[in-house]
Amino acid sequence: MDRAGVVSVLRKAEQAAELPRLGGMARAEGVVIASERFWAFARRDGSVSEGVMPAPPAAVRRVPLLRGLVKLGLALAPLFSGTGVARPRERALLLVALLAPLSLIFLPHAASLPVGIATAVVLLAWLLRGRTLFLHGAEHRAIAAVEEGSLLATWSGAARPTRFSPRCGTNFAALVLPVSVAADRLWPLSAAIYTPFAVTLLSLALTMELWQLVQASRYRVARAFLLPGLALQRLTTREPSDEETRIALTAVASVLQRELSP
């Protein structure tokens, strides 16, 4: 998609009565933007990869806790798509990080916390390398432009929507930590070999339920749960350049073009 095509889609999107809610993730090479149905990865070299987001089974969507875990897993679909969003070695690293909680089953309880922290540090170092922090800010800015209806002004640099997002994964991570501590301390069953893994899954599932309740709430007090994550975004994002914002908007245009097609 060339720049004229991107601008054309953005203009059409600004005139649309309703647009889908978007999310995304920043990579060192570009920005991924996703709706519930489609995703696009716009790279710094100008190329764009596109794909379809998998949908969870209808039955799963009605099962508390399980639905959150499934949704969390499906959000990573672009990384495992095989279309260049993540290289094979990167996918292997991510898979190891995701499966790391399984290793806690075979470790003493005292060793589980250091292993968990080490895994998180390695994963964060990988996720936030290169220009990722700046592109993370660009991702948030592009999504905010969609929600504010200022796509063209943001593309031209006349508008600079916020680089902080209430739906950022940083906010989710900030919620996981206290939920994990509470789940570990309140675990009602006797300690067993599977306990660390079960507590990890339960913590993620509970956090997803809380996350979705906070996102859906109309009450300002619920947004207090997001304050730690919003504060952390001062570390996990940087002010993007106009060109980096255009990379994110190119991914936005790719998704919206398919969403707005008859």
Image: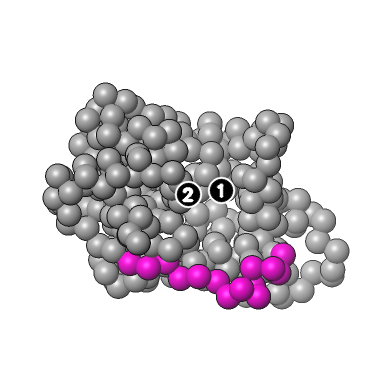
Tell me how far mark 1 sits from mark 2, CA to CA.
21 Å
The residue that appears at 30% across and 72% down in the rendered structure is 82
Label 2 is placed on what type of residue? Arg
Give the color scheme: rainbow, by chain, secondary structure or one colour. one colour
Q: Is residue 200 left or right of residue 255?
A: right
On screen, residue 225 above or below 102? above
Query: Which residue occupies 32% across, 36% down?
Result: 151
Task: Please name the residue that numbered disc 1 is placed on.
Answer: 173
Q: Main secondary structure of the magenta part?
A: loop
Residue 256 visible to the viewer:
yes
Q: Is residue 89 visible?
A: no
Secondary structure beneath label 2: loop
Is residue 62 found left or right of 45 in the rendered image?
A: right
Q: Which residue is mark 2?
A: 21
Q: Is residue 52 magenta?
A: yes
> Residue 68 placed where, x, y %?
62, 62
Q: Which residues are magenta?
A: 51-64
Q: Nearer the viewer, mark 1 or mark 2?
A: 2
Callout 1 secondary element = helix
Q: Position of residue 254 (x, y in %)?
A: 28, 55
Is 247 placed above or below 69 here? Answer: above
Amino acid type at image mark 1: Ala
Quadrant where the C terminus lies? bottom left
